[in-house]
Image: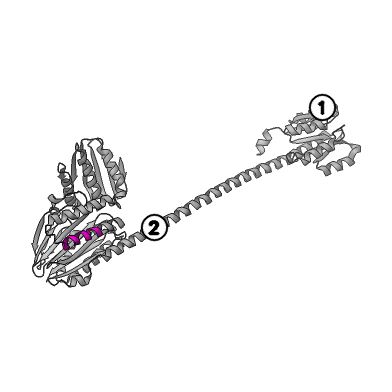
């Protein structure tokens, strides 16, 4: 599973149960984030220990952050998945938003480098 | 085409009621490599041309019952046969009848007894002519087929074109609807902003606010309201763009004003109630919108703030920059039904000449063509440099600087800025 454009790429590595995000993600509204959400949900089906690696995601707009929030709520509702977010404290949007995601799901692990 | 025809021996029908003549002719022709079929009289000849293909007919004129004239007339009046050349065979004393045959459409004539050289020459000439004719017909057929293909393609193209035009009309209508929707949203958003005259009535502070909607209208919001001797300032940003974001922004504005008018002083109750309104209404709208919102309350040099949004920037009179992070003061509104546990309040003292600045991420995230964001640092520096100017001048300079950074790039998000200075 992979979504790739000039601006960003998102791919799933089943070996490490990780979905990687890279680049500038600025889609217009939640509808346009549906394929990304779909990829995340599909990837989630396969593991009890799931990682989102956002370290190279330099930009994510507010609709994208909403999409991540909704995903975290979905993981929380499943109740049986250990979710780890890997972020970078050098990237402005992450320091702020990843903490909100942890508030949505307190059992979520945040790893900043 | 020539080689194709050359490879297949020409097929010749010999019609003569005299067996000796038939034999003589057919032997000569077969020796030259032709396929020969014989008919004993006109009736048989007519039956044969109906069922078999011939390249040439050699036909005697005088035969009992159905004679050569009738055979000739039959062949030359049938559109599917008339292209077959007919050479009439006649005796020397019957030359007048040859003239009649030529008038009826005979290609040539042969006199009995046969001269082998003339026979060969006339048969060859006739067959050559027939070959040219056949070739021409084949080309014509091919051309007609090609023309039919072209016509079919033209028809398909015309149909595709009609479909595209119809689609285009639909798109135009849809675009028109969308742009009308955006115009409405833009007007609603601007309509609801505080007027400059309201801001000027505030005596302790020099306040200026500005919002420039993005090309697709985001959901930025700010408000300044006086209540019970306090000045309430709110700034927020609804996710996404367009009508839905605008509607959520208007709901938030009304909810904030309702709570202020009702004298709600507890920041936890205040924000939790607004969150609930946004949460319930976005679910009813089947929308995934949520929003940031920070509330400020100013009274006698103290600025209290609660709610999660971008940081509050304080530029001290000496140029020092202080940032008040709001992450731990709230939570995005509309994501979760209950946010009480995330809401907190903090406060900051403002002295004369200090400036407080609120903004939405449209400012810091404004990108130029190289995808470089305007950035917070540039904003702090600019604010610090121009801290002695009036609130209105400050916001004008910031907007001007952000515009310069973006250049000709599209404005992706609303630009909102509220500047307040302690007098």
Q: Give the range drawn in magenta.
A: B249-263
Q: Residue at x 74, y 36 (%)?
A: B55
**Number of labelled discs?**
2
Please give the residue where the numbered disc 1 appears in the rendered image: B23
Please give the residue where the numbered disc 2 appears in the rendered image: B175
Chain letter belonging to callout 2: B
**Image height of B251 relative to B26, above or below:** below
Dominant secondary structure (helix, strand or loop) of the stretch shown in magenta:
helix
Tell me the quarter of the picture where residue B145 sits: top right
Front residue of this view, candidates B202 and B269? B269
Say whether residue B120 is left or right of residue B400: right
Say whether residue B322 is left or right of residue B220: left
Colour scheme in the image?
one colour
Q: Residue B227: where, in percent of width, then height?
A: 14, 66
**Image height of B351 relative to B106, above or below:** below
Image quarter (top left, top right, bottom left or bottom right) of the C terminus of chain B:
bottom left
Query: How packed is label 1: few (under 14 Cα within 10 Å), some, or many (20 or more)?
Result: some
Q: Which residue is drawn at 79% across and 32% down?
A: B45
Tell me the quarter of the picture where residue B42 sits: top right
Q: What element carries label 1?
A: helix
Which mark sits nearer the N-terminus, 1 or 2?
1
Query: How packed is label 2: few (under 14 Cα within 10 Å), some, or many (20 or more)?
Result: few
Say whether residue A13 is left or right of residue B65: left
- In the rendered image, the residue lying farthest to the front is B262
Q: Which residue is drawn at 16% across and 46% down?
A: A102
Q: Residue A91: where, in percent of width, then height?
A: 19, 51
């Amino acid at each position: 599973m992979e979504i790739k454009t000039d601006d960003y790429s998102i791919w799933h590595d089943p070996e490490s149960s990780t979905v990687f995000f890279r680049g500038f993600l600025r889609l217009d509204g939640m509808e346009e984030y549906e394929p990304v959400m779909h990829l995340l949900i599909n990837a989630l089906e396969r593991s009890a220990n799931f990682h989102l690696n956002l370290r190279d995601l330099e930009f994510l707009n507010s609709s994208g952050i909403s999409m991540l929030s909704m995903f975290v709520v979905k993981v929380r509702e499943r109740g049986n998945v250990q979710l780890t977010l890997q972020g970078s404290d050098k990237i402005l949007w992450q320091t702020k938003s990843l903490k909100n995601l942890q508030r949505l799901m307190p059992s979520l692990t945040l790893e900043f480098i | 085409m020539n080689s194709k025809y050359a490879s297949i021996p020409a097929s010749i029908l010999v019609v003569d009621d005299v067996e000796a003549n038939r034999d003589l002719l057919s032997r000569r022709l077969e020796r030259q490599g032709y396929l020969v079929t014989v008919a004993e009289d006109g009736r048989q000849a007519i039956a044969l041309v109906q069922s078999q293909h011939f390249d040439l007919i050699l036909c005697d004129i005088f035969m009992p019952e159905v004679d050569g004239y009738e055979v000739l007339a039959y062949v030359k009046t049938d559109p599917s046969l008339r292209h077959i050349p007919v050479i009439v065979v006649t005796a020397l004393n019957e030359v007048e009848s040859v003239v009649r045959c030529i008038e009826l459409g005979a290609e040539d004539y042969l006199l009995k007894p046969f001269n082998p050289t003339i026979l060969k020459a006339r048969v060859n000439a006739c067959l050559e002519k027939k070959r040219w004719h056949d070739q021409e017909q084949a080309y014509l057929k091919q051309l007609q087929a090609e023309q039919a293909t072209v016509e079919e393609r033209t028809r398909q193209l015309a149909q595709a074109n009609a479909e595209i035009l119809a689609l285009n009309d639909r798109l135009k209508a849809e675009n028109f609807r969308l742009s009308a929707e955006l115009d409405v949203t833009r007007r609603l958003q601007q309509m609801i902003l505080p007027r400059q005259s309201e801001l000027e009535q505030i005596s302790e502070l020099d306040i200026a606010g500005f919002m420039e909607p993005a090309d697709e209208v985001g959901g930025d919001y700010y408000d300044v309201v006086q209540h019970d001797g306090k000045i309430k300032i709110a700034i927020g940003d609804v996710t996404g763009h367009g009508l839905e974001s605008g509607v959520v922004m208007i709901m938030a504005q009304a909810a904030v004003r309702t709570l202020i008018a009702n004298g709600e002083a507890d920041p936890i109750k205040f924000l939790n109630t607004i969150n609930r309104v946004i949460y319930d209404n976005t679910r009813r709208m089947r929308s995934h919108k949520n929003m940031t919102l920070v509330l400020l309350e100013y009274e006698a040099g103290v600025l209290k703030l609660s709610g999660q949004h971008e940081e509050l920037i304080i530029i001290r009179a000496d140029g020092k920059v202080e940032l008040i992070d709001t992450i731990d003061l709230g939570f995005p509104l509309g994501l979760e039904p209950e946010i009480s546990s995330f809401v907190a309040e903090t406060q900051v003292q403002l002295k004369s000449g200090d400036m407080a600045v609120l903004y939405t991420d449209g400012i810091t995230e404004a990108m130029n063509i190289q995808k470089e964001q305007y950035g917070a640092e540039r904003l702090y520096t600019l604010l610090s440099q121009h801290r002695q100017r009036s609130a209105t001048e400050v916001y004008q300079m910031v907007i001007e600087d952000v515009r310069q950074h973006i250049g000709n790039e599209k404005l992706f998000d609303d630009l909102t800025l509220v500047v307040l200075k302690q007098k």
